[in-house]
Amino acid sequence: MPVINNPTVRKILRIIIPFLVVPAAVLVGAYVFEDKMYAYVSLVITILAIVLFISGFEKRRTGSRRMVIVVVMTVIAVIGRFVPIIKPVAAITVISGVFLGGESGFLVGSMTSVVSNFFWGQGPWTPFQMFSWGMIGLVAGLIGKYLKTSKPVLYIYGAFSGLLFSLIMDVWTVLWYNDGFSWDGYLAAIASAAPMTILYAFSNVIFLIILFDPIGKKLERIRTVYGL
Amino acid sequence: MKPLEKYNPAVLFIYFLLLASLVMFAANPVMTMIAFVAMNSAAVVYAGNGLGRAYIFYAVIFVLTSLANPVFSHNGVTVLLVVNDNPITLEAVLYGVMTGFTILSVLLLFRVFSTLMTSDRLLYIFGRAFPKLGLLLSMTLRFVPLFGRQRRKIENTQKTLGLYKNENAIDTIKGKLSILSAMTTWGLENGIVTADSMSARGYGIKRSRTSFSMYRFERSDAFMLCAVLLSCGFIFLGIAIDKLKTDFYPRIELSEVSAYALISYVLYALIAFFPFVAKLAEREAQKKLFKESCDNSVNRERIEKRDSV
């Protein structure tokens, strides 16, 4: 794995990629190309996610090990998407973010979207989905300390990430139905998606209750044993 | 005619990309209907499995998009009815219906796209341009079936050991969770081994890598690429200089019938129906081949009989 040696560059990349470059890419993709170039936008976001992931570690030696762990978590999330009705994807992304770091969480979230859409159907929604799941993982990593120590905070964050996912995906819904963004349409989309939002929040909390401790313990162990 | 699957993946990718953007860009009823019929026929021959069930979903999407436009947009001069002081106009309804057809065509196109552009073909294209990304994607795609197999092994082992019960729902969930737990541990350990093994074999060395499927760029690929680029360019030019424009608001104004528009429609139909025609030609060729081989075997039997007598 390549390593970015300069700590300042790493720090800058870790901030501007998720909060500036990726949202800009998603919105430019949706507005300027009007969803037509979604394949390229998905590709660009994947590359950005990998750059972000690379800027998350310092040592070359553990790079590819860490990458494979991210791949394994992604596969678990992809398989999890086949669970009917309640989906554990966001919960697994949160767990990855907390135990492997925010950058890994972002990569797990966005990769899960791309890979699982090979099975569920790629489309103009892919970049938005990548961004929302990615952000869920990244934020989980940023506030990982609190999520690890306090269960109520964890469950609140789980419910909140369901809401976050819905809010970002509704932007896509509005852009797709109308030619351009309108607040009326956005509010209508949020209202009509409310049952789904509740379902997302509910399934996130359920899967965090079930999976957080067991999978977290395993990830901790792997990190200790293999020195990640 | 060469079957579509035999073309170079890069050519196929460009073809689908251009066709998809034409389907989405061209706000022209004639072209929308051409695309809709063409994509339906292509989906039936290429992605027929489960298409019936998908149509239920498509019907819902179609109704939603057709209804959404007149509800949100009140432009247009022909008022059909007034609901809560909001006029529902004929123009908005028709525009909604056309958007519905466009979205359905795009969804059907994606369906055909995902059957034709299998993961190895996509990796063939992107693995060269972006080797790291190609490797990451191919590893993930490999792990999915691998995990499926391992899950079955663990499940069978647990059943044999008598650890797995599925008498009621709670037992089933508990059983599934213990499988997931074993899967996670195994997956993580196996992943580390894979990573170490990969770096031992030189993963990350800056050299050109090969991919699983090899495709050559043949003369027919070049021909196809030129034909697609030229005809799509012609149609895009027509859209750019307003030869194919249809105004919906304030009132519907179809584009004037011109030689340019007619040629565009013919070219569009040719490229949109190409997958369908290629498949039909392939089936015909197969039938002919089958028939010939049958005839041959009959002949051979006759000859053998005659010889034995």
Image (spheres, grey):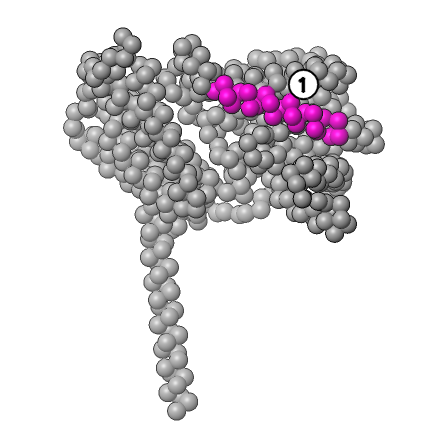
- Is residue A202 shown in magenta? yes
Say which quadrant the C terminus of chain B sits in. Answer: bottom left
Residue that lies at the very extreme toward the front in this rendered image: B168
Q: Which residues are magenta?
A: A193-216
x 48%, y 32%: residue:
A122
Residue A48 visible from this viewpoint: no
Give the dominant element type of the magenta stretch: helix, strand or loop: helix
Q: Is residue B189 above or below residue B285?
A: above
The residue nearer to you, when weighing B180 against A194, is A194
Q: Amino acid at mark 1?
A: Tyr
x 32%, y 32%: residue:
B232
Residue B159 visible from this viewpoint: yes
For mark 1, does the 10 Å Cα neighbourhood hold few (<14), some (14 to 19), or many (20 or more) residues?
many
Residue that lies at the very extreme toward the right in this rendered image: A225
x 77%, y 31%: residue:
A218
Q: Position of residue B299 (x, y in %)?
A: 36, 77
Q: Is residue B262 above or below residue B303?
A: above
Q: Quadrant of residue B263?
A: top left
Given the image, what chain letter belongs to the residue carrying mark 1? A
Q: Quadrant of residue A74?
A: top right
Q: Secondary structure at mark 1?
A: helix
With B51 as the anchor, is B160 left or right in this view? right
- Is residue B205 shown in magenta? no
x 32%, y 16%: residue:
B71
Residue that lies at the very extreme toward the bottom in this rendered image: B309
The residue nearer to you, when weighing B243 against B183, is B183
Residue picked out by circle 1: A155
